[in-house]
Structure formats: structure tokens, C-alpha cells
């Protein structure tokens, strides 16, 4: 299985995730991290028959149930033309903490505009990323998947954004592809990928003690 023709996944054994657990997926560029995340989100039809949630194959649940169960924030989010309520929040009821999230993500000005233009020409890449985070913060699923949630975000916002994500998704599954080394110690579990294979896993403290993955960890520092 490839992602943009770059990496091929080779997952030999079962991978399991549980609600209430935070998991980071790390590795050098082209390691297959985004491909794995897309597979977990159920976006690759070739592996959907092998994706189970509470012993139920994801192929057997309808689109609404899928959305309530698995939420996904891609690396490069897309938005349709329309109001903020429809384009960003999909018309769902606003959560009690939505305004707090808007302030933390510094989205007040964008929300004030009230709409997303054709091809999202009235928002920047960083704003699109933050709006994608807001979408999931407003309506968490049982499992919430993020591809580089702190990418394209100003450095001064990174820590507050991570704080908000960990707080909001503490009771759900929280799975992130990230190069943000500074916050890896906060995750319950870290998966290390290289060339489409999960080569190691553990807590960040445990991984730091393993010389075999030193080169991979050095590459993360270089990308951060």
C-alpha cells in the first residue's frame, strides 16, 4: 500500500488502540506514517476489511456511525465554499467548549468573516490547519486521528494547541503523526516507523534508551 507512490506499508502483526490512550506515530519523512494514519481512518478500501472497532469491521458500519467513531484531520485539509458552520463544523451542534478552542487557536478573526471562499482562497495554510483541528475539537469521535497537528502553526501557539488537544481527547483515542519532538513525552505510547514498517514502540523515555533507533530519533530532531 502506497501514499502518493512513496512508501509501502508492511504491517506483519495486529496493531491495537484503545480509548483513553494517546499514541504518537514518528519516523523519517517517507516512512509511511501518513499512509498508516489514512488506513486507520478507513480511507483505504484495500484494508478496510481488516480494520475493526469493538470487534465490528468498519466495512459494516454506515457513514454516520463511521464519522462518530473515527475522526480524521489530514495534513493538508480541504474546505468547501460556504459558511463556517457548514464548511468547517458540518452543521453539527456547537460544543460548550467551542469558544475556548476558537480563542486558543486564534481563529476569532476567521470565524468573524463567517464564510470560506471558493477554493478556500480567504484562508492561509496555517489557518486551514487550525480550522481542521477545530472541526474535531467541536465533535470528537471515539478515535481521533491527526496528521501533523502542530505543522503550519506558529511556534508560540504549539504548546497551547497541544495542551488543548490532550485535554479535549483525554477520554478518547488520540493518535497523531508528528515530528514535534518536544511533546512526545506526553504520549502514552510512541510507534516508530521506517520504510513502511513499525520498527519499535514504547514510551518516549523507553525509546530514548534504545541505541538501535538513535538515527531515526536524530532525523526527527532535524525535521522538527
Image: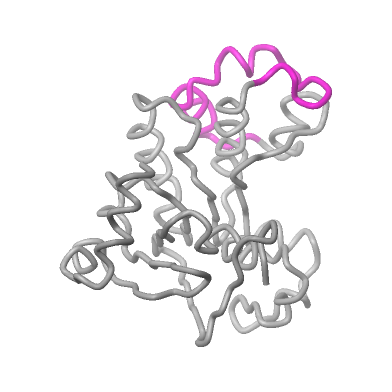
In which quadrant of the rendered view does residue 191 lie? Answer: bottom left
Compared to residue 8, the image places residue 166 above or below, namely above
Q: From the viewer's side, name the closer residue of 169 and 105.
A: 105
Compared to residue 220, the image places residue 209 above or below, namely below
Q: Quadrant of the C terminus?
A: top left
In which quadrant of the rendered view does residue 138 lie? Answer: top right
Q: Residue furthest left?
A: 209
Residue at screen point 56% across, 61% down:
142
Left or right: residue 119 versus residue 183 is right
Q: Position of residue 209 (x, y in %)?
A: 16, 68
Residue at screen point 58% across, 37% down:
95
The count of marks equals 0
Q: Give the color scheme: rainbow, by chain, secondary structure or one colour.
A: one colour
Judge whether residue 14 is colored magenta. no
In which quadrant of the rendered view does residue 54 lie? Answer: bottom right
Residue at screen point 62% across, 47% down:
74
Q: Position of residue 210 (x, y in %)?
A: 20, 71
Q: Position of residue 107 (x, y in %)?
A: 55, 21
Provide the residue span drawn in magenta: 94-123
Left or right: residue 34 versus residue 77 is left
Q: Residue furthest bottom?
A: 13
Left or right: residue 210 versus residue 157 is left
Residue at screen point 57% across, 50% down:
140
Left or right: residue 112 versus residue 219 is right
Q: Quadrant of the N terminus?
A: bottom right
Q: From the viewer's side, name the closer residue of 99 and 8.
A: 8
Compared to residue 67, the image places residue 61 above or below, namely below
Amino acid at each position: 500500500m502506497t501514499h502518493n507512490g512513496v512508501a509501502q506499508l508492511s504491517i506483519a502483526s495486529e496493531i491495537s488502540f484503545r480509548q483513553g490512550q494517546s499514541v504518537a506515530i514518528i519516523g523519517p519523512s517517507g516512512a509511511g506514517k501518513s499512509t498508516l494514519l489514512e488506513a486507520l481512518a478507513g480511507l483505504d478500501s484495500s484494508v478496510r476489511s481488516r480494520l475493526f472497532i469493538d470487534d465490528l469491521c468498519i466495512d459494516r458500519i454506515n457513514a454516520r456511525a463511521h464519522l462518530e467513531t473515527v475522526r480524521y484531520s489530514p495534513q493538508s485539509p480541504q474546505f468547501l465554499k460556504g459558511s463556517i458552520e457548514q464548511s468547517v463544523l458540518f452543521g453539527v451542534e456547537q460544543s460548550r467548549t467551542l469558544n475556548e478552542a476558537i480563542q486558543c487557536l486564534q481563529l476569532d478573526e476567521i470565524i468573524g468573516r463567517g464564510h470560506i471562499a471558493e477554493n478556500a482562497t480567504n484562508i492561509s495554510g496555517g489557518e486551514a490547519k487550525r480550522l481542521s483541528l477545530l472541526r474535531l475539537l467541536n465533535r470528537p469521535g471515539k478515535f481521533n486521528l491527526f496528521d501533523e497537528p502542530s505543522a503550519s502553526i506558529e511556534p508560540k501557539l504549539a504548546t497551547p494547541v497541544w495542551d488543548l488537544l490532550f485535554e479535549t481527547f483525554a477520554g478518547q483515542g488520540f493518535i497523531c503523526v508528528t515530528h514535534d519532538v518536544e511533546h512526545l513525552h506526553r504520549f502514552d505510547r510512541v510507534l516508530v516507523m521506517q520504510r513502511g514498517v513499525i520498527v519499535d514502540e514504547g514510551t518516549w523515555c523507553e525509546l530514548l534508551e534504545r541505541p538501535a533507533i538513535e538515527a531515526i530519533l536524530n532525523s526527527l530532531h532535524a525535521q522538527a
